[in-house]
Amino acid sequence: MHVPKPNYESHQKFLQSIANQPCSEWSFKQEPCFMEILENVSKEYGAQYLQNIEADFPMVTFEILRKYVNTNDKYGNASKTIFTTQDKKLLYCSPSSLRYLYHALILVDAFKLSGCRKIIELGAGYGGLCLAVQFVVQLFTDVTIDKYVMIDLPHSCTLIRSYLQVHEEFLTIPYEVMDDYDTISIEYSSNNEYFFVSNYCFSALSLKWQTHYLSHVLENCQHGWVTWQTCFGESINRAMVLLGKPKDSYTIVTEKPQTAPYFIENYWICF
């Protein structure tokens, strides 16, 4: 059993329609055609992400939690709810912000073991994961990220640039946003600079675009972290082929919390 891969046409048309809106008028985080792709985490999953943050990354203080979620939820009219921390403090935020924060912690934890210096994210949404990484990298004293590159569709890139610009005071890692219709102009070196990230995106692409990014990006990244969805009909074994790395280089675990039914599970793939 599998579902069709997403069509991003209506998503991109909507983003084009709000391209000139001031940030004070943004409400995209509650627009149905936007939520088909992003900002669709339930309260129940949000609670599990919070529990995982507290259990797996105890160095994340309540102050850091609150500062990030308040920052990420400030613009876009996010749908927020109340969560309770393990020491009974209340956090009023969107469930999606808790997912971004947990995934950013996992990402930086994997990145620090890779020896890479830069991150390249395929399918960056509105920049929420990049923003979360900017907040949590300070907790990893042995990690330096020289640059964070994001690749997405044209109108998503416009939103990412605007979204990160209004949060400029929190950005310490230099970043670049690249339209995926442009020639990918990153100059790769032979010293294993770039760490590849694709959170739910790569598995949702057509074979044409998977092949495109394999040859233009993945072949130049020795290490990375991918959230793989099997609901689109491509198994975890197929994923290892499409990502183009030797089979003995992969570490594969089921997504936590698991956001798909058991028969079409999601996986985290590190290489």
Image (spheres, grey):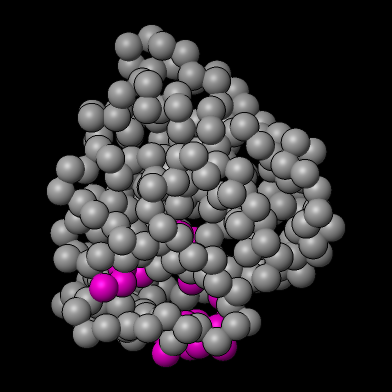
Image position, residue 155 (x, y; %): 71, 65
In the rendered view of the protein, which quadrant contains the C terminus?
A: bottom left
Report the front residue among 105 and 207. Answer: 105
Image position, residue 62 (x, y; %): 36, 21
Query: For residue 125, what is the image quadrant?
Result: bottom right
Residue furthest top in the image: 88
Q: Which residues are magenta?
A: 193-215
Query: For residue 135, what is the image quadrant?
Result: top left
Left-right relation of 171 to 109: right
Left-right relation of 139 to 66: left
In the rendered view of the protein, which quadrant contains the N terminus?
A: bottom right
Image position, residue 257 (x, y; %): 39, 43
Name the residue at 38% across, 9% down.
Answer: 88
Report the front residue among 60 and 166. Answer: 166
| 126 within the magenta span | no
Report the front residue among 215 and 241. Answer: 215
Position above or below: 102 against 122: above
Name the residue at 59% across, 33% down.
Answer: 73
Q: How many marks?
A: 0
Query: For residue 96, what is the image quadrant?
Result: top right
Left-right relation of 176 to 21: left
Name the residue at 64% across, 70% down.
Answer: 153
Left-right relation of 124 to 35: left
Position above or below: 66 against 139: above
Position above or below: 87 against 163: above
Residue furthest front in the image: 169
| 194 within the magenta span | yes
Q: Is residue 207 visible?
A: no
Image position, residue 167 (x, y; %): 55, 42
Name the residue at 27% across, 83% down.
Answer: 189
Q: Is residue 20 visible?
A: yes
